[in-house]
């Protein structure tokens, strides 16, 4: 999927919502746990219920890897289900990979060739040679960690060399590696007011924004400071949607939460003049 197709999806659905498939076997409804593949069955129900309101899904790899081989099978089945039934959706591997070049090349092959993700989150700490192997795929994206929403972000990301803070250095340096057609950035919703300054450095890139919902980030502030002429935002909500219910009606509860977010996003897109009422 290229940038124009992603923007078209945003306009058609009047949404920039990403549903995070952080599927914890310990949190899914009890009636599913006796199934042969409860994780996939949960994901399938969530996707069927929320697909009309979202442009993207983001499985967090840790929830699948923690189950061993069976978890990876559930993940692959989930991706195939999305591709076969909702082919216009953007699928992100929240993997936060980043290693020496030959290792990164294998990670890239796994996520893009074998599992057919559209994008993968990548940590920039090891520099260009650890990121470059992910950039050699047509219509695939690196989503580089820039400014995260976790409490420990201040340990390193705000450190200044006297000119730039570390996250600003990441943004400026990585602009030399790739353009908006192959690179996006993670910017946490709990840092929403900082998006105005971030947009001065990367005005055209798409941003993956976690932290809206359960983590307390404001959707309105994210849109105010971060939206650009192609929207430029993929706002993720995980727990607030997929665990909205914990009984046999869990999928409908997720649907209602996704619809609620989509309606709020629609108003923001209309206000920005990106879609019509």
Image (cartoon, helix red, strand yellow):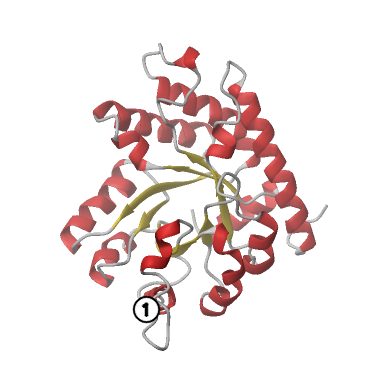
Residue 53, position as x, y percentages in the image: 65, 40
| Residue ID for mark 1 | 173
* 154 displayed left or right of 50: left
Residue beneath the point at 65% across and 27% down: 253
Most extreme residue toward the right is: 277
Residue 23 versus residue 118 in the image, above or below: above
Query: From the viewer's perspective, is residue 273 above or below residue 203?
Result: above
Provide residue 160's location: percent of width, then percent of height. Answer: 39, 81
> What's the residue at 59%, 64% (across, down)?
192
Q: Nearer the viewer, residue 138 or 166?
A: 166
| Quadrant of res 77 | top left
Q: Is residue 14 left or right of residue 72?
A: right
Whether residue 132 is visible, yes or no, is yes
Rendered view: 255 above or below 269: above
Answer with the quarter of the image where residue 155 lies. Answer: bottom left
- Residue 64, by quadrant, is top left
| Residue drawn at point x = 59 percent, y = 63 percent | 232
Instruction: Tell me if 223 is positioned left or right of 63 in this view.
Output: right
**Closest to the observer: 38 or 107?**
38
Examine the rendering and report whether any part of residue 228 can be seen. no
Label 1 environment density (alpha carbons within 10 Å; few <14, some 14–19, many ≥20): few
x and y percent of residue 137 in the render?
34, 58
Q: Position of residue 193 (x, y in %)?
A: 61, 69
Number of numbered callouts drawn: 1
Asked which secondary structure carries label 1, the reply is helix
Q: Residue at x 29, y 36 (%)?
A: 65
């Amino acid at each position: 999927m290229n940038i124009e197709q992603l923007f078209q999806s945003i306009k058609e659905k009047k949404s920039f919502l990403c549903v995070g498939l952080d599927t914890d076997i310990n949190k899914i409804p009890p009636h599913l746990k006796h199934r042969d593949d409860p994780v996939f069955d949960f994901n399938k129900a969530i996707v069927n219920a929320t697909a009309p309101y979202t442009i993207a899904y983001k499985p967090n790899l840790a929830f699948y890897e923690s189950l061993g081989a069976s978890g990876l099978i559930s993940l692959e089945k989930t991706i195939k289900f999305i591709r076969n039934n909702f082919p216009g959706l953007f699928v992100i591997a929240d993997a936060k990979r980043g290693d020496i070049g030959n290792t990164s090349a294998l990670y890239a092959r796994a996520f893009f060739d074998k599992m057919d993700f559209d994008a993968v989150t990548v940590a920039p700490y090891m520099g260009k040679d650890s990121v470059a192997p992910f950039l050699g795929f047509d219509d695939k994206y690196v989503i580089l960690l820039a400014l995260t929403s976790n409490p420990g972000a201040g340990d390193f990301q705000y450190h200044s060399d006297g000119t730039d803070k570390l996250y600003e250095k990441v943004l400026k340096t990585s602009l030399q590696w790739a353009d908006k057609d192959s690179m996006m950035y993670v910017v946490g919703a709990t840092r929403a007011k900082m998006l105005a300054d971030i947009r001065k450095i990367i005005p055209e890139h798409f941003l993956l924004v976690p932290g809206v919902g359960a983590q307390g980030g404001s959707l309105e502030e994210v849109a105010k400071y971060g939206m650009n002429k192609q929207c430029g935002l993929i706002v993720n909500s995980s727990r607030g949607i997929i665990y909205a219910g914990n009984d046999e009606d869990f999928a409908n509860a997720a649907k209602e939460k996704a619809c609620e977010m989509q309606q709020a996003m629609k108003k923001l897109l209309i206000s920005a003049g990106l879609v019509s009422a």
